[in-house]
Amino acid sequence: MQDLLQANLQPEQMLAQLPEFMGKIERLAELLGLDLSACQADHIALRVNSTALATALHQAWLAYGEEWSTNVINGRPIVVIGFHQPVQAGQWQIEALELPYPGDKAYPVQGWEHVEFVVPCQASTTEELKVVLDARFPGLDWDNLKQAGIDVKASSPAGEKERLANPTFAFKKDGVCIKLHPCSLKAVIESEG
């Protein structure tokens, strides 16, 4: 626990940092032309660079919720903890925490990294999701994202047992990331049964 405290990563410390982080998320959404007010903020994710920190965080966050799943995705464990009480983050209530164990990539800043929002639809591919996003967010100017310093990544991450397609678009700038996908993490986990 001392390592978490020194790294400013204890759950209490991270919850205190949440308003500032959500302010960055809201500014990025504004820059993107995304009105996410009607979207569910499905889960929040953090990033750490050591397995020891990830293990300590895993145990520490269990005081705030229960483990919904641990799945190997892209070669590393990803733990999902459902909060006992949804966490208030800006105007959203977030029901889960995603804690990936570190992979090959080192993050310049450890801590909060992204929030995933649900854009409910039947899209099963990134191409179908892009059509939905274009219709839902007409202000999203794909052509000018790069020059605004925003990295865009389309992916279709999947755990070993998942049956529900959940294509994702990630928009990242200055260490903050918004991800959009059609299904909640809870629904994806429930599809594993």
Image (tube, rainbow, N blue to C red):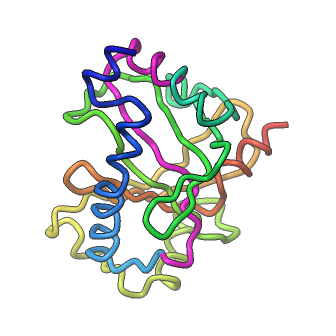
Q: Residue at x 34, y 17 (%)?
A: 50
Residue 33 location in percent, x, y? Answer: 34, 80
Q: Which of 150 and 88 is in front in this view?
A: 88
Residue 135 location in percent, x, y? Answer: 52, 85
Q: Which residue is drawn at 34% across and 60% down?
A: 171
Residue 54 belongs to the span the image colors magenta: yes
Residue 159 location in percent, x, y? Answer: 64, 34
Q: In this view, does 5 lie above or below 140?
A: above
Q: Quadrant of residue 132?
A: bottom right
Residue 19 belongs to the span the image colors magenta: no
Drawn side of residue 69 relative to residue 149, left or right:
right
Q: Which residue is farthest right?
A: 193
Q: Which segment is the magenta one?
A: 37-58
Q: Quadrant of residue 80?
A: top right
Residue 193 location in percent, x, y? Answer: 85, 37
Which quarter of the image is occupied by the N terminus? top left
Q: Residue at x 34, y 21 (%)?
A: 4
Drawn side of residue 57 relative to residue 86, left or right:
left
Circle count:
0
Q: Is residue 41 above or below residue 192?
A: below
Q: Is residue 102 above or below residue 112?
A: above
Q: Which of 144 and 51 is in front in this view?
A: 51
Q: Which residue is drawn at 29% across and 27% down?
A: 105
Drawn side of residue 158 relative to residue 37, left or right:
right
